[in-house]
Image (spheres, grey):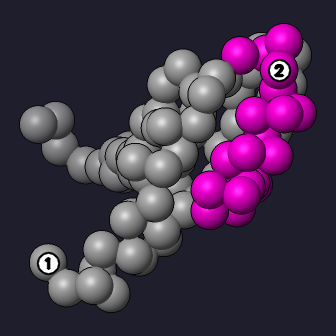
Amino acid sequence: MSESAASAPVGVVLAVDPDRFAEIVDALRRAGLTVTGEQPVVGTLSGTVPENRIAALQAVDGVEALDRERTVQLPPPDAPAQ
């Protein structure tokens, strides 16, 4: 894999300790996350990060889960059943 492919930004969704939300979000930003959405009450946030920084996000104390965003393409309503 080339260096440019390894550092291409990917969307991520993270679950963090809601009692330490602001502290953890600050640490995630320092680790390379660009935050695009926050839900502090439930302890989740979304953002983008270079592919090669995902391990750094997972290593932040208080991160409970990290999932890559996925895109699902549905067929048009008039498409035949599959």
Identify the image quadrant of the C terminus. top left
Quickly name the residue at label 2.
20
Residue occupying the point 38% across, 65% down: 52
Q: Amino acid at mark 1?
A: Met
Q: Judge from the rendering whether residue 57 lies leftward or rightward of residue 6; answer left or right.
A: right
The answer to whether residue 69 of the structure is visible from this angle is no
Q: Amino acid at mark 2?
A: Arg
Q: Judge from the rendering whether residue 53 lies leftward or rightward of residue 76; answer left or right.
A: right
Q: Is residue 20 magenta?
A: yes
Measuring from the top left, give residue 38's x and y in whole percent: 81, 38
Residue occupying the point 39% across, 76% down: 7
- For the residues labelled 1 and 2, the Cα–Cα distance comes to 36 Å
- Among the 4 quarters of the image, the one containing residue 35: bottom right
Mark 2 crowdedness (10 Å alpha carbons): few <14, some 14-19, many ≥20: few
Identify the image quadrant of the N terminus. bottom left
Front one among 60 and 33: 60
Residue occupying the point 54% across, 62% down: 49
Decide: is 62 above or below 37: above
Q: CB under 8 Å between callouts 1 and 2?
A: no
Instruction: Report the number of numbered marks.
Output: 2
Numbered range of the magenta stretch: 17-36
Residue occupying the point 53% across, 45% down: 57
- Among the 4 quarters of the image, the one containing residue 68: top left
Q: Secondary structure at mark 1?
A: loop
Measuring from the top left, give residue 46's x and y in whole percent: 66, 44
The answer to whether residue 8 of the structure is visible from this angle is yes
Q: Judge from the rendering whether residue 76 lies leftward or rightward of residue 60; answer left or right.
A: left
Measuring from the top left, give residue 54's x and y in whole percent: 43, 52
Measuring from the top left, give residue 34's x and y in whole percent: 70, 61
